[in-house]
Image (cartoon, rainbow, N blue to C red):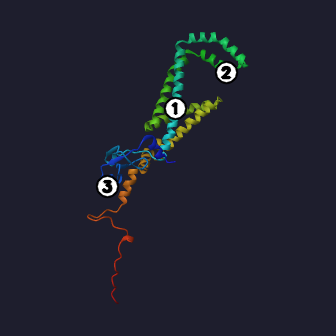
Amino acid sequence: MDWSLLGCASKGHVTYAPDEPELRDRLMAPTAGGTAWRCLRCGAFVTGGQHGSGPVAAAPMVRRGKELRSELILRVFAVERFLRFLIIGVAAYGVWWFKYDQAGIQRAYNNALPAIRALYQDLGFDVSHSKLLVLINHTLTISPRWLTILTIGLPVYAVIELVESIGLWLGQRWGEYFAMVATSIFLPLEVYELAAGRITWLKVATFVINLLLVIYLVWTRRLFGVRGGKAAYEARLRSESVIEAEQAALAAAPPAQPGHGPAPPASARPDTPERPRPDR
């Protein structure tokens, strides 16, 4: 699969006209429809003019190939983080509402409890073993101190998840660092929960997703100096750049002599008569 072509299909082509004349000539081609410029992502020549111009040092570093696949993976994590933000945000609103109207909610629940018990019996469930009713009763009797902690903690947690989602979606390095650090902070707590025997499929899935995200970010994005750090990461981006390849080809080409074109290959040169060797 050509990820570069997929990237251009979804984002559009990225072209650039460097100020350096020789390099500029290698990135453009005249066509019947006008001047075509070489896309820095997929490498194809496309018409419509260049998106930017300036010195080659100011050319954008465009992600290509496997980097686009990595960007897609991070966006999947970003969507998962955004869903967490929505869920935690709704929970935070519910806790806030409950904190300031606990008595009213308690009365409403007590009034609805006979109907709930009747519904359980009609469905053939044992009310005394209902985990849902036990959870509701425990929630209604939670202490004001814990309510205050949840009222503050849940919105903060939701904002953290939102910032992670935005940073991962944009593919910014600050977002990758933020997501890695924020996710790592909660890993010890998740390990403790699992080690204490409170194992559920949701906790296991959450732990696995968070652990995979931390490992993936550190390894592929070379965070905290891993595998050469930021310098090595940007060097690899430059090595895969279309402009970098054209610069290397330009540097490797033999210099043309003034007033002469490039020297033809040996096979194309006309044969010259061999000079007679003197008799000895």
Location of residue 88 with respect to 171 vertically, above or below: above
The residue under label 2 is 131
Q: Nearer the viewer, mark 3 or mark 1?
A: 3
Q: Which badge, 3 or 1, comes first in the chain's sequence?
A: 3
Position in image of residue 241 (x %, y %): 41, 49
Position in image of residue 47 (x %, y %): 37, 47
Tell me the element at label 3. helix
Q: How many marks?
A: 3
Answer whether residue 149 is visible to the viewer in this image: no
- Residue 81's disc is 1
Q: Describe residue 156's horizontal placement relative to residue 58 as left or right.
A: right
Answer whether residue 233 is visible to the viewer in this image: yes
- Tell me if label 2 and label 1 are in contact, CB under 8 Å: no
Q: Which three-letter amino acid code belongs to the residue tagged 3?
A: Glu
Location of residue 73 with respect to 162 vertically, above or below: below
What is the distance, in whole Å, between disc 2 and disc 1 at their CAs? Answer: 28 Å
The residue under label 3 is 22
Position in image of residue 20 (x %, y %): 30, 51
Location of residue 107 by image quarter:
top right
Tell me the element at label 2. helix
Compare residues 180 and 163 and report the one nearer the observer: 163
- Tell me if label 2 and label 3 are in contact, CB under 8 Å: no
Q: Which three-letter amino acid code belongs to the residue tagged 1?
A: Arg
The residue lying at 67 percent from left, 21 percent from top is: 131
Within 10 Å of the Cα at label 3, are there few (<14), some (14-19), or many (20+) other Cα atoms?
A: few
Tell me the element at label 1. helix
Position in image of residue 129 (x %, y %): 71, 20
